[in-house]
Image (spheres, coloured by chain):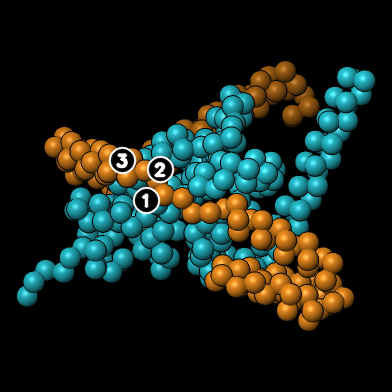
Chain colours: A cyan, B orange
Amino acid sequence: MAEQPLSEVDENQLVELAKSDQEAFGELYERYVSRIYNYVYYRTGNHHDAEDLTARVFQRAMQHIPNYVNRGLPFSAWLYRIAHNLVVNWHRDQRRRKVVSLDELVLTGLQSEAPEYVAEHREEHEALLSAVRALSPERQELLILKFVERLSNAEIGMIMGRSEGAIKSLYHRTLLALRDEIEKQQKVTERKTHSRFRRRS
Amino acid sequence: VNKQHVADMIEEHSEALLRGEDRSRQLLERYPEVSGVLADLFSLTNRLYDALVPIEPSHQFVAELKANLAHLRASTVKQGFQHRPPVRTRIANPQRTLLSVVAGVALITSLVGSVVMLVALLVGRGRRRHPATIA
């Protein structure tokens, strides 16, 4: 009987194979690299760090996969945990360095549009993404998994270790918090514009 | 309409949006008493849907990282690191566990002995200073 190609192997079986077989690990990598990259990208806001952290996620995964134990959760939950921990450390380092640029992030997704559209929506996107990144890591994670990864509440629940109902109410609270954050940021911007105008006049 | 209902409607709207449908009008018509709050949150959801778009990492990055991982694994295997027992296994080694228990018992015994000696010494001093009181 012909051997089954790795691309058709079921995930649990593939993970077991990947513990000792680099080719199987390569297949796992192919399946998840984009998702992990997206996750890291939206949590960091730039391609450079997203690439660096994605590489570290898979290096760590490869190093620890022999000890991986299947507890009935999807393999992606384990990868997202690694990514989450690395992003948290990255943010800790960034706070020390105080260098965060949203420019690159804001322009992504708008590049294919007309320049007028980019100019018009740039500020709005910037405000929204900056407000998203001011939320707690848990809330950011939920929004990324929902909108970027397009996962259902049940899948998000498995990754975040919560029930489907808990994810639904967390999503509601997240939207309310995001709305408050946007208002808060708008007030700060208005105050700054106002004081700049007063100084000029 | 309570908090739970609002959460349910937001969920319904978001799920529809992610499927490519816009159900905001129907939902707002169904619950006019909370249409103000809902309209706000629906609009925010639409903005998130527009802003949080999936992106693709560059092909070059994906290919290079895959090659690097394969190289890293090959060099790790070459050095024999892969066969090193994981940390958890080493801790679970029965000889190591026995040694830790013996060391723990010895430590506790020596501590108790020191305390007993110290107390005996203090009592002895007290007797020498106040013989009458003790008698």
> Which residue sits at x=78%, y=75%?
B28
Disc 2 is placed on an element classified as: helix
Q: Residues within 10 Å of mark 2 (few under 14, many from 20)?
A: many
Subunit bearing disc 3: B
- Give me the C-alpha separation between circle 1 and circle 2: 8 Å
Q: What label does residue A54 carry, if any?
A: 2
- The residue lying toward the viewer, choosing from A154 and A189, is A189
- The answer to whether residue A186 shows anywhere in this view is yes
Is A41 on the left-hand or right-hand side of B70? right
Residue A10 horizontal/vertical position (percent): 28, 69
- Give me the C-alpha separation between circle 2 and circle 3: 14 Å
Quadrant where the C terminus of chain B is found in the figure: top right
In the image, farthest residue toward the bottom:
B30
Subunit bearing disc 2: A
> Which residue sits at x=84%, y=72%?
B34
- Residue A190, by quadrant, is top right
* Circle 2: residue type: Thr
State the residue position of label 3. Answer: B60
- The answer to whether residue A88 shows anywhere in this view is no
* Circle 3: residue type: Gln
Subunit bearing disc 1: A
